[in-house]
Amino acid sequence: MKIAVTSSGKTIEDNVDERFGRAPYFLIIEDDKVEAIENENLTAGGGVGVQTSQMLADKGVEAVIAGNFGPKAFQVLDAAGIKAYSASGKKVSEALDLLSQGKLEPVQGASKQSHW
């Protein structure tokens, strides 16, 4: 499974970022390979959640872990068939372990209002 995790830095030992659309980095994990991507939408004016969701869909991501998701971002992820998981207060490595153990439940909707 190809997984994207919001991150405060470029490694799996960094924290899961609370923001989805404005997270500084996304770590794309597939098998044992980790790719750190700087979020090019970080400083965009509006529509960041939608743009970021589309970027991850274009990369073939099947699941996303973040602290929170806004309504428009969640809607695009859901329409693309990408499962969204919340892992607030965890390191990326911890969130990945919880997901692999089946201990993270998919979120069922937005956890924050637009423009959080």
Image (spheres, grey):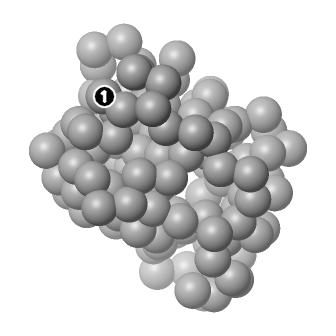
Drawn side of residue 33 relative to residue 62, left or right: left
As helix, strand or loop, the secondary structure at mark 1 comes to helix
Name the quarter where the C terminus is drawn.
bottom right
Q: Position of residue 107 (x, y in %)?
A: 65, 50
Residue at the image point whose x is 69% and y is 82% from the top: 113
Image location (x, y in percent) of residue 74 = 73, 58
Q: Is residue 76 above or below residue 99?
A: below
Q: Nearer the viewer, residue 92 or 90?
A: 90
Kindly tell me whether residue 10 is visible in this rendering.
Answer: no
Instruction: Pick out the residue farthest to the top.
Output: 31
The answer to whether 107 is drawn above or below residue 28 in the figure is below
Q: Looking at the image, is 103 positioned above or below residue 45?
A: above
Image quadrant in which you'd find residue 106: top right
Judge whether residue 70 can be spotted in this image: yes
Decide if residue 87 is on the left or right side of residue 41: left
Kind of residue sitting beneath label 1: Asp
What residue is drawn where x is 70% and y is 66%? 110
The residue indicated by pointer 1 is 97
**Residue beneath the point at 40% across and 21% down:** 100
> Which x, y percent locates residue 46?
67, 83
Residue farthest toward the right in the current orientation of the protein: 79
For residue 12, side relative to residue 31 (left or right): left
Residue 23 placement, left or right of 82: left
Total number of numbered discs in the rendering = 1
At 30% from the left and 28% from the top, the residue drawn is 97
Q: Residue furthest left?
A: 13
Residue located farthest toward the front when viewing the structure as drawn:
103
Mark 1 surroundings: few (<14), some (14-19) or many (≥20) residues within 10 A: few
Across and down, in percent, residue 52 comes to 60, 58
Return the residue nearer the eye: 7 or 108. Answer: 108
Dividing the picture into quarters, in which one does residue 81 lie?
top right
